[in-house]
Amino acid sequence: MTTALVTGAGRGIGRAVALRLAQSGLAVGVTDLDGATAAKVAAEIAAAGGRATGVAADVTQPETLRAAVATIEAALGPIGVLVNNAGWDQFHLFVETDPAFWDRVIAVNYRGVLASTHAVVGGMIARRQGRIVSIASDAGRVGSTGEAVYSGCKAAVIGFSKALAREVARHGITVNAVAPGVTDTQLLHDVMQGERGARILEGVKRTIPLARLGTPEDVAGAVAYLVSDAAAYVTGQVLSVSGGLTMVG
C-alpha cells in the first residue's frame, strides 16, 4: 500500500484530500499545525477501514517536517505521494502590509512547500517513483486583489513545480499543481472577514460560470486524479479547479 503525506490536513481542502486518498486505497500521513485536528482526521480514516496516522508538524520548521516524515514512515511505510496543502493568508491591500506579514505568508505558502518536498523527494528518488502535488491557487495564475503576497507565493509554487518536474522525471516521479479558485473553506471566510472582503466575495460569486463556490471535495478529486495511475504521463502541469472563473491557456 502506497503511503501519502498530506500537509495542513486537519480541515478544509487538506482534510478532504486525506479522506479521498484513503478511499482510493492509500495509507495517509495526516499532518497539521494543530496535532489534535490531524489525529481526528486520521481517526476518521481508520474508522472507515483505512490506515492513517496523525502528526503535528509546522511547515515553516523543516526539522519538525523531517520528524513527522520519520514517524509516518515508521507507522505506514515509505512515502510515495506528497500533497503540499498547508497554507495561510489574510486579506490586505499590499500598501497596508509590512515585512513581518510578507515573511509569514512566504514562510507558510512557499518555503513550506520547499521544506515538505525536500523532506521526502530524496526517498522518492532512491525508490525511483513518486507523486508530488502542490495546492497552488488561481491567484497565482491571474492575481487576486487583496492577496498580492499570497498570489506571488502561489505563482512561485507553480514555477517550482514545473522546474522540479523536469529535474525528477528521469527518476519516475511526477510533479504537478492544482490551482483552486474560490473554495468554500474556513480559510476563505477567515481571509474575507470584514465588509470589504464580503463585498469582494459576493462579486466573485456572481462571475463564476458554474454559479457556486468550489468545495474541498472538488479539489480533492483533482488531486486524486494526479496521484493515480491514470495520470502517470502527466507532469509539470497546473490543473485549475475554479468552476470556469478563470480560463487561462
Image (cartoon, helix red, strand yellow):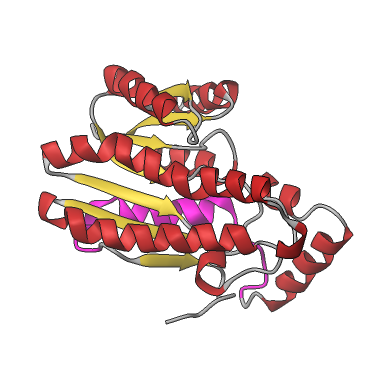
Furthest residue in direction front, as rendered = 99
At x 59%, y 57%, the residue is 150
Residue 11: x and y in percent read 59, 37
What is the quadrant of the N terminus in the image?
A: top left
Residue 34: x and y in percent read 59, 26
Instruction: Quadrant for residue 159, please give it.
Output: bottom left
The correct choice, above or below, for 71 with respect to 167 in the image is above
What is the quadrant of the C terminus in the image?
A: bottom left
Instruction: Quadrant for residue 73, please give it.
Output: top left
At x 70%, y 52%, the residue is 98
Magenta span has 13? no
Residue 51: x and y in percent read 36, 25
176 displayed left or right of 142: left
6 displayed left or right of 89: left
The correct choice, above or below, for 24 with respect to 205 in the image is above
- Stretch of the chain drawn in magenta: 210-234
83 displayed left or right of 233: right
Please tell me which residue lies in front, 161 or 222: 161
Please tell me which residue lies in front, 113 or 40: 113
The correct choice, above or below, for 245 with respect to 111 in the image is below
